[in-house]
Structures are given as structure tokens and as C-alpha cells.
Amino acid sequence: MAIDAGQVDEKIEVKRYSLQQPLSAYTFPTETPRIHQVRFDETHIHVDLVDGRILSIPLAWIPTLHQADPQEREKYEINRSRTGLIWDPDRCAINEELFIRDYLGPYPTT
């Protein structure tokens, strides 16, 4: 059942809170995210970025890594711009490229 917007008279109270710290005290990333180091556990690839963020991506999201032997996952190279990981099929059993920007958004609309 559709409700006509003119029929709704309910008012919603909005609470506003002041920041405990000035906005200038907060840190927001402004540069291209760059890879510092990478590590794996049983279910995730963890990518430490140079700005201090840690990006954890479920291996299930990346079938080639999820199905690969743990020793093969470790045979990645960080690309020159430090924005992606490359598994070279000439050096390991994986043929994959992973770019950090693909996992940070903004997300495409459908």
C-alpha cells in the first residue's frame, strides 16, 4: 500500500552533537594509496598501506588466490607505483593482478 507523502505529519527530532576535537585534528587520506607490505592468513590478504591503513580482503573474493597453495600466494611482486600486486605465471602457479583502488571505492552504481 502506497502512502501519500502529504498524509505523514510525524516529525523526527534530530540530535546534533559537537565534535570533541576540531576537524583539523582528524586525518583523511589525500594521496593515492600505496602498498607498504602484504601478508596472508587462512582467509584474507592483508595489505598495509604507507599511510597507516590496513586493507583486509577476503580471499574468497579473488578465486585464483583462494584456490592457490599458500606458498604460491607469497610469490607476488608489488608494482612500481606500489598500487598493485602481480603474480607472474612465469614465476608461480598464479596469473593475477590486484589493484588497491578496486577495493577502496567509490563503488560503481548499477
Image (cartoon, helix red, strand yellow):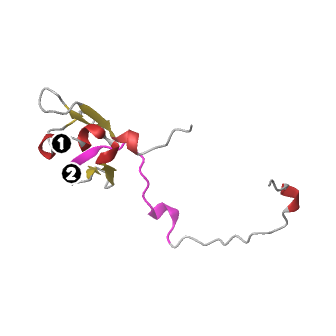
Residue 86 drawn in magenta: no
Looking at the picture, how far across and down is residue 69, in whole percent? 15, 43
Residue displayed at 45% across by 64% down: 25
Q: Is residue 27 magenta?
A: yes
Query: Which label was assigned to residue 73?
Result: 1
Residue 62 x %, y %: 31, 41
Q: Quadrant of residue 17?
A: bottom right
Label 1 secondary element = helix
Q: Looking at the rendering, in which quadrant would you find the N terminus? A: bottom right
- Magenta range is 21-38
Q: Position of residue 80 (x, y in %)?
A: 23, 33
The structure residue drawn at horizontal position 66% and vertical position 72%, both measured from the top left corner, is 15
Q: Are marks 2 and 1 in contact (CB under 8 Å)?
A: yes
The answer to whether residue 89 is left or right of residue 15 is: left
Residue appearing at x 70%, y 70% in the figure: 14
Mark 2, other Cα within 10 Å: few <14 / some 14–19 / many ≥20:
some
Q: Which residue is mark 2?
A: 40
Q: Looking at the image, is 39 positioned above or below residue 24?
A: above
In the figure, is residue 42 to the left or right of 101? left
Residue at image point 41% right, 50% down: 29
